[in-house]
Image (cartoon, rainbow, N blue to C red):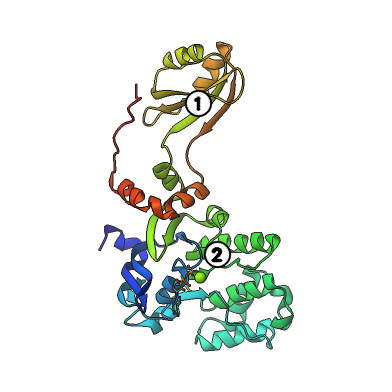
Amino acid sequence: MASTTENAVIEICELTKKYGSKKAVDNISLSVKRGEVLGFLGPNGAGKSTTMNILTGYISATSGKALVDGTDVLEDPKTVKTKIGYLPENPPLYFDMTVLEYLNFVYELKKVTLSRKKHIEEIMKTVKIDGVADRMIKNLSKGYKQRVGLAQALIGNPEVLILDEPTVGLDPKQIIEIRDVIKVLGKDRTVILSTHILQEVTAVCDRVAIINHGKLIAMDSLKNLSARFGEKGMYLIRALGTKSAVKELLESIEGLKSIRYISSTEPDTVDFKIAFKDGLDLRKRIFEVFASANLPILEFKSLDLTLEEIFIKVTNDENLAQVAAKNNEKGAAEDESNI
Ligand code: ADP
Ligand code: MG
């Protein structure tokens, strides 16, 4: 397997799940490092829950392999369940129990040996439900029910947390609260969370795996994805002045790799796309040069893509072939307008 095996706590290798002739998960391979927070991002029906259900030992795969902390999920789902805290799409709550009764019940179910009272109290504090310990679960708001779901996942102090759409159905305030809790949890645990909400990934994840139609179509940090699918190191600059004056000035600056004119929609201004030579950041210098030449810069922005743009680009079926090609063409050819 890949050389990342050593610090990987989760390894998925060529995993496939078929329902009849339909592939819900189609040959997915990925690994998650210890301590990492990975976002599974994909539209409804992409195969996120199915992948998570296999990883947590709740359903079997048609083929492929999944390891959690070295244990094969398909061979030994029981052991894997003790290593993972799982928050399924619909948390298995018992509505007629109080929060405390329920967490005690889960504690027994999981056959945990940690000091019971202390452990449960700590978890309730972490997910901020200590104030509702004696309330019936059925009387809690959706946001609180979700926290109780998180609490049950934390019983037994598992190192890996798998959270399936943890903020679905919550209001904006509750979403922010749950995200904050997940950020805290992610500090000393490995977390995989699924979502179809782009901001969620930006808000909490170190890396993102984009899944569509059961296939893994991209997996990287947000920064790298943005650079890979966007125009790496490219900036758009809009200045007040003539095309020739701005071009001449840009050409006088050392360290630019390319300069390309684009017409501007704003009167008396010109737009240029520029790129710095590798490793250089000339933004400050450019501002100074333009200011002293009396050609004010009105806009200066990176052309890296937002996650939203990446997502649209990679989940658009027509673009899939291109994406695959782009994945393979490391060290792409230089732009023809390079200087
Ligand atoms: P996601 O969680 O990304 O929304 P799922 O993993 O739930 O996606 O589903 C992936 C695909 O597999 C969907 O097309 C779904 O209809 C199908 N699917 C999921 N579970 C079953 C099942 N038990 N039987 C048949 N098809 C299923
Ligand atoms: Mg799902």
Q: Is residue 190 visible?
A: no
Q: Nearer the viewer, residue 106 or 298?
A: 298
Disc 2 marks which amino acid?
Leu
State how many labels appear: 2
User: How packed is label 2: few (under 14 Cα within 10 Å), some, or many (20 or more)?
Assistant: some
Q: Nearer the viewer, residue 164 or 83?
A: 164
Residue named by callout 2: 185
Q: Residue, x 51% and y 84% (percent of image)?
A: 112
Disc marking residue 283: 1
Relative to residue 94, is residue 167 depicted above or below? Answer: above
Disc 1 marks which amino acid?
Arg
Relative to residue 89, is residue 200 depicted above or below? Answer: above
Of labels 2 and 1, earlier in sequence is 2
Relative to residue 250, is residue 234 depicted above or below? Answer: below
Numbered disc 2: secondary structure? helix
Q: Residue, x 34% and y 30% (percent of image)?
A: 335
User: How packed is label 1: few (under 14 Cα within 10 Å), some, or many (20 or more)?
Assistant: few
Q: Position of residue 308 (x, y in %)?
A: 52, 49
| Quadrant housing the C terminus | top left
| Quadrant housing the N terminus | bottom left
Q: CA distance from mark 2 to mark 1?
A: 37 Å
Relative to residue 112, is residue 274 depicted above or below? Answer: above
Mark 2 vs mark 1: give the one in front: 1
